[in-house]
Amino acid sequence: MAKNPLRVLVTGAAGQIGYALVPMIARGVMLGPEQPVILHMLDIPPAAEALNGVKMELVDAAFPLLKGVIASTDAVEACTDVNVAVMVGGFPRKEGMERKDVMSKNVSIYKSQASALEKHAAKDCKVLVVANPANTNALILKEFAPSITQKNITCLTRLDHNRALGQISERLSVQVSDVKNVIIWGNHSSTQYPDVNHATVKTQAGEKPVRELVKDDEWLNSAFITTVQQRGAAIIKARKLSSALSAASSACDHIRDWVCATPEGYWVSMGVYSDGSYNIPAGLIYSFPVTCCNGEWTIVQGLKIDEFSRKKLDLTAQELTEEKTLAYSCLS
Amino acid sequence: MENLDVLQKVVVLLGCLYLSWRIVRYIWSFLDVGKDPVIVLVTGAAGQIGYALVPMIARGAMLGSDQPVILHMLDIEPAADILEGVKMELMDGAFPLLKGVIATTDVNEACKGVDIAIMLGGFPRRKGMGTKALISKNVGIYKTQALALEQHADPNCKVLVVANPANTNALILKEFAPSIPEENITCLTRLDHNRALSQISANLNVHVGDVKNVIIWGNHSSTHYADANHATVDIGVGYKSVRELVANDHWLDSEFITSVQQRGDAIIKARRLSSALSAASAACDHMRDWILGTPKGTWVSMGVYSDGSYGIQPGLIYSFPVTCEKGVWSIVQGLNIGEFERGKMDDSARELIEEKAWAYSYLH
């Protein structure tokens, strides 16, 4: 018995991340190989033709799971009945723009999209914000879509999480699938804290802590952290374009693990609405280690936080608090 | 007393067998019984089709969700940094199936041990450039790559040429890699095949997955012939022929054919960029169906080494309808070919013969 199709919205779908993301969704990478999907693609009017080109390509690819495609510049049409919303669209930072300017442009975009989702999306719609500033855009969205459960509004830090796994696996010359349970704490920005204190590697002799195997605390506490934080810039330098492929892939991982559950013994990093866990101020969208089951995420509790980590956790929380204040000032 | 003795012996024997079984199982659990990784080469990997293709390969879209892969990515020196950036992103993707990535500008390193080669790289058509000039720019490239594959690739390597002129590039490759079986050298017409399915599905307002068995005959160029004469639509209670359902022979014999031929241009017009997403997806479909087999009752289009079937001159790489089983393709035989179809098929064959002659003239 075939499943009913789920509706997946991708905003900013005419852009690079969108172009990498939509074939992944259409192939079942996001929701599983048995789950049919209907894609709703939204972008701004200047991109309408390009968006239509993407729709043409999706039809030409004859994906068996893809039961329909809507390409629209109308937020209401795009948001109607969607079960999953991946918000890739936002105002990009241009050269010479101040942080306040980027913030103010995005605050108004996310306010109006929040309103459209609130009114037209499916009741239990799960939202993933990718466009930067991701955490704060997600917070604005939450504020202006009060009937969407706050648990259902998240932002992407899975890319940083996967990057951290990749760095460890390269350092130890092991398969990336043998490394698990790094944590990305905080803001998806240069203050994020990639934490390996609870990360392990599967070896012949069982699971071993990363710190023990790497045997280089100096590296783990400095160069490793900055490499993960600055990986985005490194890829722009190499490709002359930003990391669409890996961003799209991690967006799929984020939603898939959320909807289909994390494997036993694994956690992942998600930017979620903080409830005061780990002494992080409540009411921020902050990246925590989470496990997922039955379509719900739960913050992994009880992890030991050492002094070094405590400072890092607080630094990124402080940045988020400042961003929240700035965002609110743009609204009034 | 004797019975007790026997019983004791039996119990001890059973106990030993049980313990041995437990020990064997314990040792077995350490062995990784997953499949060996398959090495996949992508040339021109720093370009747009490459960028769309490599995550599809890394996620199992080409070879199945339980087949680990090692990616070899090749491009020219000016693209070395970009290629490195793609490798970084593949690492950042944390793909469970991706067991290794090589990013190189050295064709010999790239071809080492490859089981599958997807040739995206080639000299692109510049504005105003005719096909003859395009061929002249590509024969050298395909000769070099053929020699590298011949020397370093797995002897059973399966090759898919995508870069245009695809059919003739594949022919050059075949000429200079004589120890690769000729049936293992193919070119991509699956994109046109999928586009034809999608045009019919749009016309009939059905899901593209319900349409099958169109055929793309000939050259992956403006002379390819999109043939719907044997195509059918799943209407729930069986299959009906496309001709019957469309009920518009004029459309099928003219506009339908040209819309498939011109789809690439239509997408460039809309996106300002060529159709990387659907080309990459079609490349995955081509390989996957070739290796894992076509579903029963369904055929696909592949550019393959012609053996004289349907009166097409042997020794060309010509797109035919094929079914695939156990890694081998076979041309679907016995299809009725009317006068109209005959004309179209021969036109495309003539073009390929001409391209072949040009290519050979540049080689000597």
Image (spheres, rainbow, N blue to C red):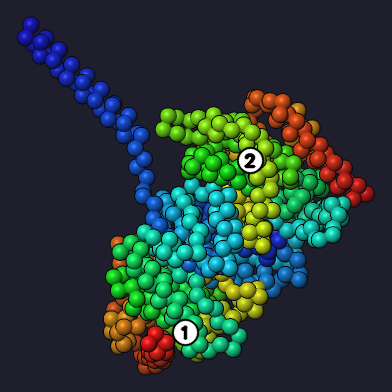
For the C terminus of chain B, the quadrant is: bottom left
Residue found at x 74% / y 49%: A134
Question: Where does label 1 land, which residue?
Answer: B135
Q: Give the number of the disc on residue A55.
A: none
Discs 1, 2: same chain: no
Residue found at x 30% / y 67%: B328
Q: Is residue A322 visible?
A: yes
Question: Residue A195 or A317: which is nearer the viewer?
Answer: A195
The answer to whether B226 appears left or right of A332 in the picture is: left
- Whether A204 is drawn above or below B37: the answer is above
Mark 1 chain? B
Residue B96 spot, x, y in % from top left: 48, 47
Question: Residue A291 or B40: which is nearer the viewer?
Answer: B40
In the picture as drawn, the residue positioned furthest to the top comes out as B1
Mark 2 chain? A
Residue A252 spot, x, y in % from top left: 59, 51
Quadrant in the picture for residue B161: bottom left
Indicate the amino acid at tag 2: Phe
Indicate the amino acid at tag 1: Ile
Q: Is residue A67 visible?
A: no
SS state under label 1: helix
- Whether A20 is drawn above or below A161: the answer is below
**Mark 1–mark 2 distance (CA, rounded to whole Å):** 49 Å
For the N terminus of chain B, the quadrant is: top left
The answer to whether A153 appears left or right of A261 in the picture is: right
Quadrant in the picture for residue B301: bottom left
Question: Residue A82 or B125: which is nearer the viewer?
Answer: B125
Q: How many marks?
A: 2
Q: Are marks 1 and 2 in contact (CB under 8 Å)?
A: no
Residue B4 spot, x, y in % from top left: 11, 9
Question: Where does label 2 land, which residue?
Answer: A224
